[in-house]
Amino acid sequence: MAKLVLIRHGQSEWNALNLFNGWVDTKLSEQGIEQAKHAGELLKAEGIEFDQAYTSVLTRAITTLHYALEEAGQLYVPEEKSWRLNERHYGALQGKNKAAAAEKYGEDQVHIWRRSYDVLPPLLDNYEETVEVEGKTYPAFDARYADVPYGELPLGENLKVTLERVLPFWDAKIKKDLAAGKDVVIAAHGNSLRALVKHLENISDDDILNVEIANGQPIVYDLAADLTINSKKVLK
């Protein structure tokens, strides 16, 4: 039997400012750092020892993994990063204030963009487009995606597209580790983890809209040899 632990990164600087974050590479806020450390304390108390760690290529997820593993006394655990575990790409909404977007487009429309399973947000025009927030310019994409084939990078995603992007990495890497009996931790993002939860728990397209994953609260799955779920609990 293998254990799979999912950790949503701690609060980011843009979470704190109520901005659409997506693939823009922001850091953890002070609260986010404390949430990440607390996640590690919870894992240590639970007594889980990991064989492999996975995370995205975004700083807020990477540092969450490191803080959590350090607090758990397991910073030595091998880790692999992949853009396929990134947060959902919010397209042209990235960098925009969520309340301001609701005023501009209407609350109902923004709610549909944020919560629907298969409705895309407004898309970026191209891969070179930038986001400007408070006088600072952020690239839509950067050097960390240099090895990704042209056309595979999204210009905006819904949860359905996010799941389609995550699954190849799940099948090629994570699933094989779990099938081999390894205990695995994934530190990633609200929507990439919601996509995995949908797949793991076979949640319907409608029901996944009501699933929330809290910052810094590890979800622990005990998996049978065929990777069906024996038990699940959230550490708080």
Image (cartoon, grey):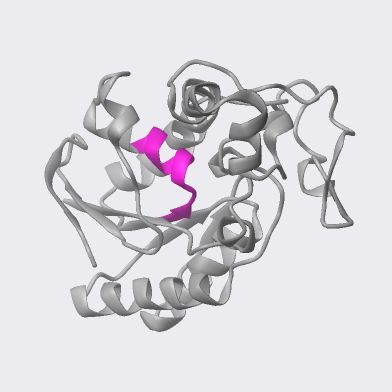
Determine the residue positioned at 42% across, 72% down.
35
Viewer-proximal residue among 46 and 169: 46
**Residue 192 among magenta residues:** yes
Determine the residue positioned at 52% across, 28% down.
107
Residue 186 is situated, as x and y percent measured from the top left of the image, at 42, 54
Determine the residue positioned at 78% across, 26% down.
124
Q: How many discs appear?
A: 0
Viewer-proximal residue among 57 and 15: 15
Determine the residue positioned at 49% across, 74% down.
31
Eyeballing the image, is 214 above or below 50?
above
Residue 181 is situated, as x and y percent measured from the top left of the image, at 25, 51
Quarter holding residue 195 = top left
Viewer-proximal residue among 160 and 178: 160
Residue 229 is situated, as x and y percent measured from the top left of the image, at 15, 40
Quarter holding residue 130 = top right
**Relative to 124, is 200 on the left or the right?**
left
Q: Which residues are magenta?
A: 186-196
Q: Residue furthest left?
A: 230
